[in-house]
Image (cartoon, grey):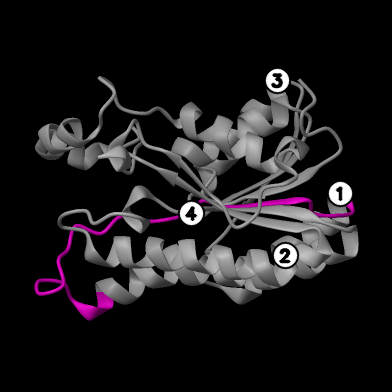
Amino acid sequence: MGRLENKVAIITGAANGMGAMEAKLFAEEGAKVVATDIQTEAVEKTVNEIKENGGDAIAFKHNVTSEDEWKQIIAASINAYGKIDILINNAGVSSPDTIATMEMVDWNKVMDINLNGCVIGMKYVIPEMQKAGGGSVINISSIGGIVGMAGTSPYTAAKGALRSLSKSAAVDYAKDHIRVNSLHPGIIETPMTAPSMKDAMQYYQTFTQLPYLGKPEDVAYGALFLASDESRFMTGAELVIDGGWTAL
């Protein structure tokens, strides 16, 4: 307990899955949590559960592709808690498309949410971290940002770009005591991956070396480490939580 005491964390995509688990775990560890998601009722449920367990959290409906909404949420966070120490860019969508079969509208949607939303978040949160004297940005990428994955070209392109962007930002802002790391989950059982589980289970199990798939808490504990001062000498790094997929 207390690994994030007195820290303020914005967590996008906090309605369910990994984002919700991160929000709950961070609150348990003492953070004040700003939970955001496009799914209003679900993210409010996350926050209510945090409050019922004695935590401190607020919820916002949030389209991460909107600069105006980012500005409003950041201003509200500063008004409520005085600073921002942690940003987790967790919101994302999947994309069952290959290059030859995809529509450009789908490509652009995936890029807007999975990459541009993270860029906008960093653009407006990093200046607040500079004012606070430092911070930790955690960009939730994927093993698809490191290795090729079948049938999901827009998704892997966005996650690969996010990996590289994290490294560039880490170099730019290290002098400000702002750490930027990317986190790369493998196959995690969440509402977003559920539709593909039946058809792709054999594929997932072939590449995942451990005899089980990941749970949201497996990723949340990795994010907790990157958010805490325990990782104070880590920036520009890739934390892979994939059951051995990339060990092949």
Asked if disc 1 and disc 3 are in contact, CB closer than 8 Å, the reply is no
Real-space Cα distance between discs 1 and 2? Answer: 14 Å
Residue 223: where, in percent of width, then height? Answer: 59, 39
Q: Which one is nearer the viewer's eye here, 219 or 197?
A: 219
Q: Total of numbered circles in the picture?
A: 4
Task: Give the CA distance from mark 1 to mark 3.
Answer: 19 Å
Q: Tell me which numbered mark, 3 or 4, is placed earlier along the sequence.
A: 3
Q: Earlier in the sequence, mark 4 or mark 1?
A: 1
Type of secondary structure dominating the magenta stretch: loop
Q: Which residue position is annotated with label 2? A: 125
Please name the residue that numbered disc 3 is placed on.
Answer: 53
**SS class of the residue under badge 2?**
helix
Residue 129, position in %: x, y?
81, 61
Residue located 75% across and 44% down the image:
232
For residue 91, the mark is: 4
What is the distance, in whole Å, between disc 3 and disc 4 at their CAs? 24 Å
Mark 1 vs mark 2: give the one in front. 2
Mark 4, Cα crowd under 10 Å, few <14 / some 14-19 / many 20+, is: many
Residue type, numbered disc 4: Ala
Three-letter code for the amino acid on which mark 3 is drawn:
Asn
